[in-house]
């Protein structure tokens, strides 16, 4: 081998070594990019699983912090021309603050990312706006969202924390932000469409339920009318019969005064044989019971007619608590063998309301309360004024509702009752009615101790728009 050949071999080996070193650097770079991509994908996945915009922003900040460590970070979106507004901040400070676009920010928005060793030397006014005067290093980059150019600002308390290569690498991070926000926007659109479908279904089911209630009301009113006629006859005839029986006993007593001893003896024997003296007391008790029964049936029919015929869906100035008494009369038979009713009412001012709709709320809540009580229960009903609002509380000492179920208690079709015992629409409809009256209904409950439903209604001087 000549010296020339030896020299060529050395050069060839050097080129191979250089090529291997370059390949190793490229492999390391690919590994780094792969690791970064994994982090970015995981961050995007976490952001897509978030349920609120705040959770999405915080997930993005967490991913950014892995890629380029910071002590504070801000996402800014365009406001009026020449101004940016803080949409989100890792420190939860300065959100919604507005920044004027100075030459530094403008150069980033229109150009490339910038890494600044010590931002304090430039003394930008927006540091004070962001309450970030204690930071030194800054990394700024722009990204696109909804056809607008937005800004990402990352700050560190250390000087020289960010270098030029960090500014180049930040482009991959802003790409993540753009993709994540775009994906999240699509997800929110899907969720909004789904929510609209659910709301539409709820409205349709509410209409069906209201139609059923209206039909049931008409049927009940018809039944009440049919019962009212014969019960009126029974009541009238009962009074006549009671008077006639009393007259018969008066005749008997009068006969005793005018009969001869022999006939009187026969009458006394017959009176004793047929226990007429006992029958006189018996008839008095029987007539008293019958009159009480007729009175109760008449009272129930009257209440049922008043409840069912109140189908006026217009707003009227009236006592919003009036329907509680009517509802209790309707449920009297269910209540009397199950629990005790305690009422504590203070005078409340009249307010515009739709009475029959509020009656439906009271009916739903009281039926739930009665069904939750096993034995020897108590239902406390209170109404009072508080801070220019009417408050109605229905508190039972029944089985209660598990804490895990309370968040869904007003959802349509959600029920804690056994199959066949509830549609899951009662509380949903009740909430919709209360909201229609610009009010609020809340629930608190403890298992095996009871449940409290609280309705708060504003005092309306006129029907809501």
Image (cartoon, rainbow, N blue to C red):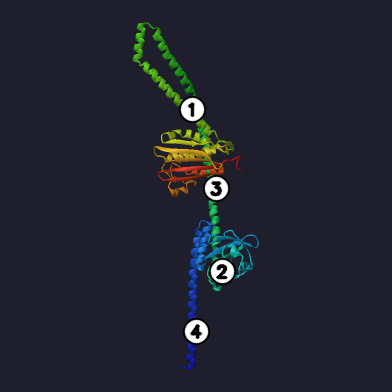
Q: Which residue is situated farthest in the top direction here?
A: 260
Give the tally of numbered discs: 4
Which of the two discs, 2 and 1, labels the residue nearer the N terminus? 2
Q: Which residue is mark 1?
A: 298
For disc 3, the neighbor class at 10 Å (few under 14, some 14 to 19, many from 20) is few
Query: In the structure shown, which secondary structural element does the residue marked by tag 3 occupy?
Result: helix
Seen in the picture, residue 143 relative to 20 is either above or below; the reply is above
- Circle number at residue 245: none
Q: Which residue is mark 4?
A: 15
- Circle number at residue 138: 2
Query: In the structure shown, which secondary structural element does the residue marked by tag 1 occupy?
Result: helix
Which of the two discs, 3 and 1, labels the residue nearer the N terminus? 3
The quadrant holding residue 332 is: top left
Which of the two discs, 4 and 1, labels the residue nearer the N terminus? 4
Q: CA distance from mark 3 to mark 1?
A: 42 Å
Query: In the structure shown, which secondary structural element does the residue marked by tag 2 occupy?
Result: strand
């Amino acid at each position: 081998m000549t010296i020339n050949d030896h020299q060529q071999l050395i050069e060839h080996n050097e080129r191979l070594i250089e090529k291997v070193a370059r390949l190793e650097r490229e492999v390391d770079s690919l590994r780094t990019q792969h690791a970064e991509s994994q982090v970015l994908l995981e961050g995007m996945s976490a952001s897509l699983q978030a349920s609120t915009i705040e959770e999405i922003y915080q997930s993005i900040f967490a991913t950014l912090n892995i890629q380029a460590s910071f002590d504070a970070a801000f996402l800014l979106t365009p406001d009026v021309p020449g101004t940016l507004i803080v949409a989100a901040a890792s420190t939860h400070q300065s959100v919604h603050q507005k920044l004027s676009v100075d030459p530094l920010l403008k150069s980033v928005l229109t150009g490339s990312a910038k890494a600044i060793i010590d931002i304090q030397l430039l003394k930008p006014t927006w540091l004070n706006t962001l309450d970030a005067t204690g930071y030194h290093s800054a990394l700024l980059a722009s990204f696109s969202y909804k056809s607008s150019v937005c800004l990402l600002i990352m700050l560190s308390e250390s000087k020289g924390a960010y270098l030029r290569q960090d500014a180049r690498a930040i482009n991959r991070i802003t790409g993540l932000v753009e993709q994540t926000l775009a994906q999240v926007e699509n997800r929110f659109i899907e969720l909004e469409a789904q929510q609209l479908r659910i709301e539409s279904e709820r409205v349709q089911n509410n209409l069906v339920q209201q139609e059923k209630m209206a039909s049931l009301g008409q049927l009940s009113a018809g039944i009440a009318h049919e019962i009212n006629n014969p019960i009126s006859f029974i009541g009238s005839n009962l009074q006549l019969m009671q008077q006639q029986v009393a007259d018969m006993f008066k005749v008997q007593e009068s006969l005793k005064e005018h009969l001869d001893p022999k006939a009187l003896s026969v009458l006394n024997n017959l009176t004793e044989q047929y226990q007429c003296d006992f029958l006189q007391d018996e008839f008095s008790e029987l007539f008293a019971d019958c009159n009480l029964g007729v009175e109760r049936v008449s009272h129930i029919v009257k209440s049922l007619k008043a409840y069912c015929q109140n189908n006026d869906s217009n707003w009227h100035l009236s006592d919003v608590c009036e329907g509680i008494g009517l509802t209790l009369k309707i449920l009297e038979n269910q209540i009397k063998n199950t629990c005790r009713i305690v009422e504590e009412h203070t005078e409340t001012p009249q307010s515009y309301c739709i009475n029959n709709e509020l009656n439906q709320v009271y009916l739903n809540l009281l039926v739930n309360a009665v069904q939750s009580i096993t034995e020897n229960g108590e239902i406390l009903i209170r109404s009072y004024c508080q801070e220019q609002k009417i408050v109605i509380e229905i508190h039972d000492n029944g089985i209660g509702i598990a804490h895990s179920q309370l968040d869904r208690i007003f959802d349509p079709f959600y029920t804690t009752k056994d199959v066949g015992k509830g549609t899951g629409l009662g509380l949903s409809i009740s909430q919709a009615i209360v909201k229609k009256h610009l009010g609020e209904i809340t629930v608190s409950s403890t298992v095996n101790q009871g449940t409290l439903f609280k309705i708060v209604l504003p005092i309306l001087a006129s029907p809501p728009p």
